[in-house]
Image (cartoon, helix red, strand yellow):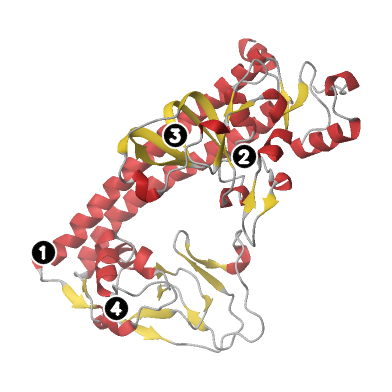
Amino acid sequence: MLEVAHREQVGSISEWLAVRDLNRLGVDVIPTGWSLSSVGDACDIRNELRLPIAVEDRAQMDGRFPYYGPTGVLGHINEYRAEGEFALIGEDGDHFLDPSNKPQTVRVSGRFNVNNHAHLVAGTDKCDVEWFAYFYRNRDIFHSLTRQGANRFKLTKASLERLPILLPPLSEQRRIAEILRTWDEAIEKLEALRAAKERLSEAVQLRLFEAEYEAQKNLKRAKEIFEPVSERGRTDLPLLAVMQDIGIVRRDVLERRVVMPEGDTSSYKVVRPGDFVISLRSFEGGLEHSQISGLVSPAYTVLRPTHSTVDEYFSTYFKSRSFVGRLDKLIFGIRDGKQIAFRDFGDMLIPAPPIATQRRAAEILSALGEDIKIETRRIAALHRQKRGLMQKLLTGEWRVSEISEGANG
């Protein structure tokens, strides 16, 4: 239970400033026994340890010491400048714009280096470095950024020093950090398990598809199996977004921002369930398969099977390394802004085994894919639960002593 903050808890910060800072932190009052401070007063910022090195110079310094940017390791070099326990928080970068999904801090330890795009924050007798790292891990700090251009923002050292931070007693900071670290470790284990299953699925895909190329008996030109279609004039159908990571979805249910067309959409192409779409970036991620009806931009090429096929077989094949590697070689030199022509795709030799073989392969690949989806759902659930736990623990709404007493009872 939170109690009303007393003025003496705020210290030298004026009352109105304290209220503003608390609002930014998402709390109404300071928990009993906690205090409100600033990062500059509570932590030790060690930017003098930063070591900016150009990419071409780093290439000549290969070694074992990590070289960090604001969001992670950029490489390894043969010398180090920093040693100990630190947290990094970006000085600039686009991760600022998506704090709920992109961590704003990175914990580092041992011997390492940091470029000049991240601030180094060390702990003190007031603030444990791990507490700072968790406190600002997914916190929105957009209000403290300085605009550097159209879509470029910067967290200056002065702004970092002014960021507010709630401080429980040091022992409580460490207990909370330990709880959250346990969740991180569980998530990391599940992510490692998912990665192993993804490698297995990829290996099985390569074996299945490459076996057809090696046998040279079930290969056909793509144009013998698929044809381009330009069905138009269906303005009653919903607009679709073609995305490499999530496939083809309705634009009106997409959470991320997309540009919506203005005016007449009668020239837009109709996509039906079972169709495939060649997007502008197909050379990177393959073709997208649709399970819904809708409209896509005329810039896309819509493909429809000319005879019976097993959707799951080709939808997996057109996203596989086997296909993407061949497609990339075929359209070498074609990059952003240039469409892959159907005549080039149509001349490709692709596996086309009998329907029974397609169906058996699809069942195997589908089972592997479903297993990966299960792990993905488990990871997402843990992330949601951890975000909720962080909200409770980092604001003092739940106290670790109360949690321990509840567990013991």
Location of residue 80 by image quarter = top left
Residue contact at pointers 2 and 4, CB within 8 angstroms: no
Q: Earlier in the sequence, mark 2 or mark 4?
A: 2
- Who is closer to the viewer here, 401 or 20? 20
Secondary structure under badge 1? helix
Looking at the picture, which amino acid does disc 1 mark?
A: Glu
Question: What separation in Å lies between label 1 and label 2 (alpha carbons)?
Answer: 49 Å
Secondary structure under badge 2? loop
Q: Earlier in the sequence, mark 4 or mark 1?
A: 1
Label ID, residue 345: 4
The x, y position of residue 229, in whole percent, is 41, 86
Q: Nearer the viewer, mark 1 or mark 2?
A: 2
Q: Nearer the viewer, mark 3 or mark 4?
A: 3
Q: Which residue is mark 2?
A: 138
Question: What separation in Å lies between label 2 and label 4 (alpha carbons)?
Answer: 43 Å
The x, y position of residue 181, in whole percent, is 52, 25
Q: Which residue is mark 3?
A: 113
